[in-house]
Amino acid sequence: MPTKRPVSRFLAGALASLVATSAMAADLPSSGLIESGKLTYGVAATFAPFEFSRDGELTGFDIDMMAALAEKLGAEPVAKNMEFKGLIPALQGDRIDFINSAMYINPARSEQVDFLEYMQIGNRVVVQAGNPKGITGRDDSLCGMTIAVTLGGIQESQARADDERCTAAGKDGINVMTLPTAQDSALTLRQGRADAIYDSTPGAVMLLEKVADTYEVVGEEFEQNTRVGMAFRKGETEVKDAVAAALDEIVADGTYDALVAKWNLPASVSIFK
């Protein structure tokens, strides 16, 4: 009669197998890379705080995240900086392994590439430092205020919807001041000609960093319906799966959250809850 294995030993062996499988999950793929041992990614370093140049060096959330992912995979990260419009052609032309450039996910791009989502971003209410008008966020505290927004941008439609909401509730409406650029809106707020502005989450982060002690954000991030992802060649799963496994690891060990905090992004940008 065959000897039965002790249950505890069997469970220990199964656990060891699971641990080993987990440890191998973020292995660098044996094929599909432009250069063995390296993760060559395309980036358009003009979108702070995700990727930009500082003192001649690439920096930002995506650059730091790529370094962490490459470390998990035992690879060298190699950034290829180019114009944003050239990223997808470079990927399709096998000049890079994937795109890591805070690329917004939309249907047109999804027809050309496969995305690995890693973030969601929305918009913030920005006021003068010290919040002299006592605005608490995108709520009724804005009724009767002047909001400066970019003409034709998503923030204009948001502000006009809020104006309608205020007047429908019998409150003072919002004066929606439209200006050519986000920079014009920020200057108008700084000069006190507007009480608040709406800006994208990354735009608000950089505004507060570039002009210290001038602005502050109030309330929660809103309309977080913009998804951000790394882009891979259609149907090629090896590299994408390896990066996804490494992403899981940096989320689990807290590296991802630490980078969110480092670059002054709100915790709400994380899709990993």
Image (cartoon, rainbow, N blue to C red):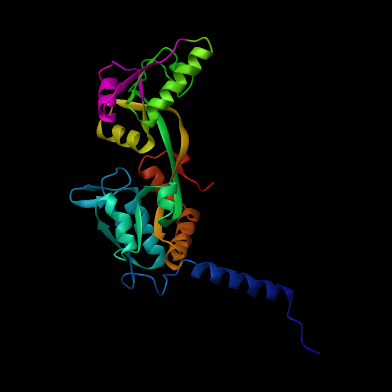
Please name the residue shown 76% across and 86% down the image: 3
In the depicted structure, whether residue 146 falls above or below residue 45: above
Asked whether residue 178 is drawn in magenta, I would say yes
Q: How many marks?
A: 0
In the depicted structure, whether residue 41 falls above or below residue 271: below
Q: Visible in this render: residue 49? A: yes
Q: Quadrant of the N terminus?
A: bottom right
Viewer-nearest residue: 24 or 124: 124
In the depicted structure, whether residue 258 falls above or below residue 219: below
Residue 204 occupies which quadrant of the picture? Answer: top left
Please name the residue shown 78% across and 88% down the image: 2
Please name the residue shown 46% across and 66% down the image: 237
Q: Tell me residue 262's x, y (percent).
A: 36, 44
Asked whether residue 187 is drawn in magenta, I would say yes
In the depicted structure, whether residue 232 falls above or below residue 225: below
Residue 176 occupies which quadrant of the picture? Answer: top left
Q: Tell me residue 120's x, y (percent).
A: 45, 43
Q: Tell me residue 98's x, y (percent).
A: 36, 60
Viewer-nearest residue: 170 or 216: 170
**In the visual, does 45 lie left or right of 15?**
left
In the picture as drawn, the residue positioned furthest to the bottom comes out as 1
Identify the magenta region.
172-197
Q: Visible in this render: residue 257? A: no
Q: Tell me residue 126's x, y (percent).
A: 36, 26
In the picture as drawn, the residue positioned furthest to the left comes out as 56
Please name the residue shown 38% across and 28% down the image: 155
